[in-house]
Amino acid sequence: MSERLPRARAIRLGWTLAAVTVLCALPFYLDAFWLRIGLFSMAAAVGAVGLGLLSGTAGQLSLGHAFFLAVGAYGYVWLAGEPGPGLPTAVAAVLAVLLAGAAGGLFSPVAGRVRGIYLGVATLALVFLGHHVLLTADSVTGGFNGRSVPPLELGGFSFSTDSELTLLGVPFGAEERLWYLGLALFAVTWFTARGILRGRPGRALVALRDSETAAAVMGVNVSRYRSAAFVVSSMYAGLAGVLIALSFRRVVPDYFGLVLSVDYLAMIVIGGLGSVAGATAGAVFVTALPLLMTRYADQLPLVAAPGTTDGTVGPTEAARYLYGAAIVLILLFAPDGLHGLARRLRARLRSRRAAPPPSDTTAPSQPPTSAVRAKEPTP
């Protein structure tokens, strides 16, 4: 048993290094469309991991995730742009994440006392309130047309196309540069979230989800941990909002609506509640599907190509129908999501490998000696 654990860790480390190597090499081979899909997926994964901690691990229903995404995105734009303080973009990005956490902290007293559908309705009000503010606060948000996003600069290096950069004969534009920024932010999200889940805070949040009474008996401060989960989730959403703003290069109020919050709920349900890997898989599925269907709409039946009226539904609506059907299938046949399904498949493969091979020779079956009845003597 002691020999199997180091071997399993070595195999896991090898797969991790291989995945990192492949992800780092992709900008040298993929065009801008595929890199853009990857950027949007990484930004969505950061936000989905935060919502997974709140709803999947702590058991708090939230429909206001789009509000905190908007706080992060518009906070960065206003802090780094004009009109605004015009701060260095790196400082503006950090302050935007803290601003989203502060917004979550202001709402945390409600999150600490309300749960279930009541908390969902309360967070739903944040989305409508935030959308109204984005439309009316023209001096900060730019109103209906939104605002352009200042490119991020770190140590004189710009994540934009203003300066020419070529590596190994491949020109690196904004998508290629932002790809590595997205990978770094996603890596930070992955390891911090897994650290929370594996540590004492994660065990306390799971206890809260299962039974608040039992958690309180074990010494868990129910209100404090529920509020802390909301603040941490809001900070992850703010970081995702910053990355979304940098990827889109323009932010508009209509993007941060109720539909976006529902999309994030779909991500964590499809991927698996309470799982970092599951939230990532769900984010990639929900984000990439409409973009792929838009690109290949002319090759799909019953789907109208963008800008035409042919077909039954547009690619975006068709994508929503598909992952809506995926949610139904997940709830019926795999309630623990894609992550749980993959875990069961791995366990089944391990059991098949560990099973002894069938014997070629089979001995004729004999009844046990104790079961054979002795022959009675003939009188």
Image (cartoon, rainbow, N blue to C red):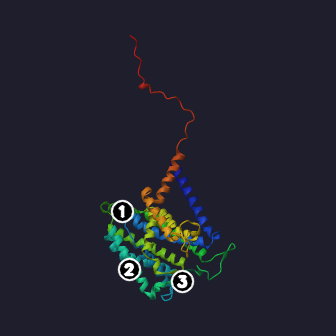
Which of 276/62 is in front?
62
**How many angstroms separate mark 3 from mark 2 (CA)?**
26 Å
**How many angstroms separate mark 3 from mark 1 (CA)?**
41 Å
**Mark 3 lies on residue:** 150
Nearer the viewer's eye, disc 2 or disc 1?
2
Which of 99/349 is in front?
349
**Mark 1 lies on residue:** 209
Q: Secondary structure at mark 3?
A: loop
Q: Secondary structure at mark 2?
A: helix
Q: Secondary structure at mark 1?
A: helix
**Badge 3 amino acid:** Pro
**Badge 1 amino acid:** Arg
Q: Is residue 346 above or below residue 116?
A: above
| Residue 359 visible in image | yes
The reply, left or right, for residue 146 in relation to residue 123 is right
Which of 349/333 is in front?
333
**Mark 2 lies on residue:** 129
Q: Residue lying furthest top in this view?
A: 379
How far across and how far down the image is residue 249, in percent?
A: 54, 80
How far across and how far down the image is residue 362, in percent?
A: 54, 32
**Badge 2 amino acid:** Leu
How far across and how far down the image is residue 303, in percent?
A: 54, 68
Q: Which mark is residue 149?
A: none
Q: Are marks 3 and 1 in contact (CB under 8 Å)?
A: no
Mark sitting earlier along the chain (3/1): 3
Residue at 34% x, 73% y is 122
Q: Residues within 10 Å of mark 2 (few under 14, many from 20)?
A: few
Q: Where on the picture, by quarter, is residue 52?
A: bottom left
Mark sitting earlier along the chain (3/2): 2
Mark sitting earlier along the chain (2/1): 2
